Amino acid sequence: MKQTDFLVIGSGIAGLSYALKVAQHYPDKRVLVITKTRIDETNTKYAQGGIAGVTDFEHDSYDKHIQDTLIAGDGLCNPHTVEIVVTEGPERIKEIIEWGTRFDKDAEGDFKLGKEGGHSEFRILHHKDVTGKEIERALLDTVGKQKNIEINKHWFVLDLITQHHLGYLVTKSTPDIECYGVYALDQHTNKIVKILSKITLLATGGNGQAYRTTTNPTIATGDGVAMVYRAKGRIENMEFIQFHPTALYEPGVSPSFLITEAVRGDGGILRNNKGEAFMEKYDERKDLAPRDIVARAIDSEMKRAGTEHVWLDCRHMDKTKFVEHFPNIYEKCRSIGIDISTQFIPVAPAAHYSCGGIKVDEWGHTSITHLYACGECSSTGLHGANRLASNSLLEALVFSHRCYLDSVQKVDRIVFQQDIPDWNAEGTTEPDEMILITQSLKELQLLMSDYVGIVRTHTRLQRASKRLDLLHEEIESLYETTAVSPQLCEVRNLITVGYLIVKEAQFRKESRGLHYNTDYPQKSIILQNIVL
Ligand code: FAD
Ligand code: SIN
């Protein structure tokens, strides 16, 4: 058993920035960070384009950033959350700069600001095209110096501990569900450890692995969302899965390599199989329309021509500038034989970001007491029906700060719950057929991509729902009889995530933002967040 004042699950931007703040605030309290694989293997590390934030007040304003976010969110953003994130964001960006993050600057020492889809101004701070790697590096360097932070790598959190584990019946209508900590699998010893905590923060990231083609690394399996759902907490807006318009088309390679939207911000043009620039047919903002519009336009061009990708044309762009801003992309293209100054880049949409997730309020409280959530696993109301590019790193920083402010005031009033039983592994045996797990994952990814992708229909969702029921039944019976492993738990979590996406998509009888259903092509006049 372990005991800690603050338990942080996840070592991306959300988890590490929260851990640092609480540890600095209370140098005598213990902060335990758990991460399921290598410490830096996170969605954060792969962020390319950058972090949106108003820093150039001569051309930009909070008002413009707020408007851009609201327009992208297509009516479903919570305006109060948008205001919080946009106005508090610049202060949080200053902090990560103080912690050592280096954003690109020009000769005068001003930030070189990028532009992406849906932004009316240049406002994206970046470190070349590897912004996330730079942020993760700076955070890990600073965390490493903080003596009261312990990091457990290769530990897999299985479930939240609540009254359910004390023998009480807990349902969605139980008024005060409490979190006492988690059960986690220490992958070094293969033992399941009970970790008691006063405060628990979920910063478990996204769920792109529910789809066959995704920009997300293999850790993105929606574990936090699935755990909260099992613990009877509230989940919302899962139907809004953002597909990034331009992942590099490389059959057989997973995850997909991203070609940042900032390339289009600097002048890249999408072209169809005939070489025509097609975006003007779909939106007056052309290649820099919000992502839902561009991804749907690409999908439609691919379906019309029967192709598996479209092209991104960068031939007209200044090569020296391209290499300076996008060295990682330039190198990747070169490594597969594409010279961006003479050839097109093949690109196709890929599952990229989960706009919904664990429902939280403006201080990051989930519906479960002493349990906070921030970062991509949470649903704060910022993104509504479609996230504005580069707003997620910003949201993670603003909300990890708010979770910190709230939780440090509460921690001393919470006592450890001592009567928690150990994990019960009775009746389970070591898995002898990994194929059962790997095949379930493949089936899930296929059905989600084919039936619950960019364009949905009533019949496709119904089919997906039936197939998911079967997968659910099979994985639950495997789970009851087999010793737990990260692979088994991840597939089980992804099936839960798939179920939530499909259910919420079925409830939404309209097309809005990232949810496009040809049976309900119009927007409803009733604005609603769908909560399960
Ligand atoms: P992550 O960084 O994903 O961290 C999740 C952590 O949780 C990991 O440490 C993982 O090990 C841990 N974890 C999960 N489950 C468990 C478990 N069961 N047990 C233990 N540990 C667990 N956003 C922008 O704003 N700008 C960009 O330019 C941008 N570019 C992107 C490019 C790519 C290719 C991708 C994939 C995303 C991009 N995004 C971008 C989105 C952004 O990177 C993510 O939303 C953000 O980094 C998520 O941070 P996080 O801290 O919430 O989660
Ligand atoms: C990108 O660089 O295009 C990704 C930005 C984001 O997902 O916010």
Image (spheres, grey):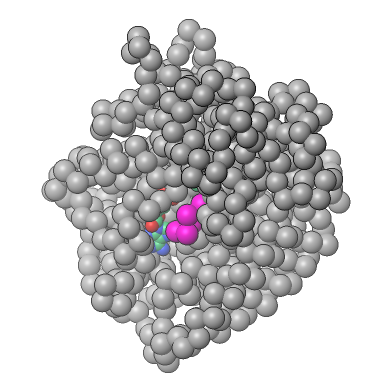
Number of callouts: 0
* Quarter assignment of residue 115: top right
Going 82% across and 58% down the picture, which residue do you hit? 458
**Frontmost residue, 230 versus 501:** 501
Q: On the rendered structure, is 18 left or right of 215?
A: left
Q: Main secondary structure of the magenta part?
A: loop
In which quadrant of the rendered image does the C terminus lie?
bottom right
Q: Is residue 110 magenta?
A: no
**Frontmost residue, 48 versus 148:** 48
Q: On the rendered structure, is 486 left or right of 276?
A: left
Going 71% across and 23% down the picture, which residue do you hit? 285
Going 57% across and 70% down the picture, which residue do you hit? 441
* Quarter assignment of residue 404: top left
Q: Is residue 59 above or below residue 358?
A: above
In which quadrant of the rendered image does the N terminus lie?
bottom left
**Frontmost residue, 435 versus 515:** 435
Among all residues in the image, which is located at the extreme bottom? Answer: 427
Q: Is residue 330 above or below residue 437?
A: above
Magenta residues, start to end: 216-220
Residue 162, given in percent of the width and then of the height, sits at 40, 67
Residue 374, given in percent of the width and then of the height, sits at 43, 46
Note whether residue 119 is visible: no
Note whether residue 488 is visible: yes
Q: On the rendered structure, is 9 left or right of 54?
A: left
Q: Is residue 218 magenta?
A: yes
Q: Is residue 19 above or below residue 169?
A: above
Going 76% across and 37% down the picture, which residue do you hit? 272
Residue 364, given in percent of the width and then of the height, sits at 43, 44
Residue 292, given in percent of the width and then of the height, sits at 69, 39
